Image: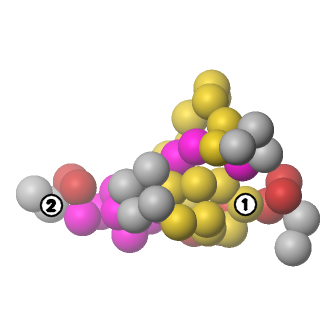
Amino acid sequence: MEHSVLFYCVKCEQLKTMEQAGLLFRTGYYRVLYPLGCCVHCEIATRSV
């Protein structure tokens, strides 16, 4: 899988595909390869708390 189709979810601490991204940050990279963000599942869980 190409690096450009992955992002790092800062909540669940896993690499996910861009289709699962709920929120992507414009700055910061995990190991300089992956954008940082929050997956849809974690974003929904955070909002319901």
One can see residue 15 in this view: yes
| Label 1 crowd (10 A; few <14 / some 14-19 / many >=20) | many
Q: Nearer the viewer, residue 21 or 1?
A: 1
Q: Going 84% across and 58% down the picture, which residue do you hit?
A: 3
Q: Outermost residue toward the left? A: 49
> Is 23 colored magenta in this rendering?
no
User: Is 12 rendered above or below residue 35?
Assistant: below
Position of the C terminus by quadrant: bottom left
Q: CA distance from mark 2 to mark 1?
A: 25 Å
**What segment carries the magenta color?**
34-45
* Residue ID for mark 1: 6
> Percent position (x, y) of residue 39?
48, 61
Q: Position of residue 9 (x, y in %)?
A: 50, 56
Residue 40 included in the magenta stretch of the image: yes
**Residue 1 drawn at (x, y percent):** 87, 73
Looking at the image, is 15 positioned above or below residue 43? Answer: below
Asked which secondary structure carries label 2, the reply is loop
Taking the image as shown, residue 8 lies to the left or right of residue 31, namely left
Image position of 25 (left or right of 39): right
Identify the residue at horizontal 63%, vertical 26% (top origin): 27
Farthest residue, direction right: 2
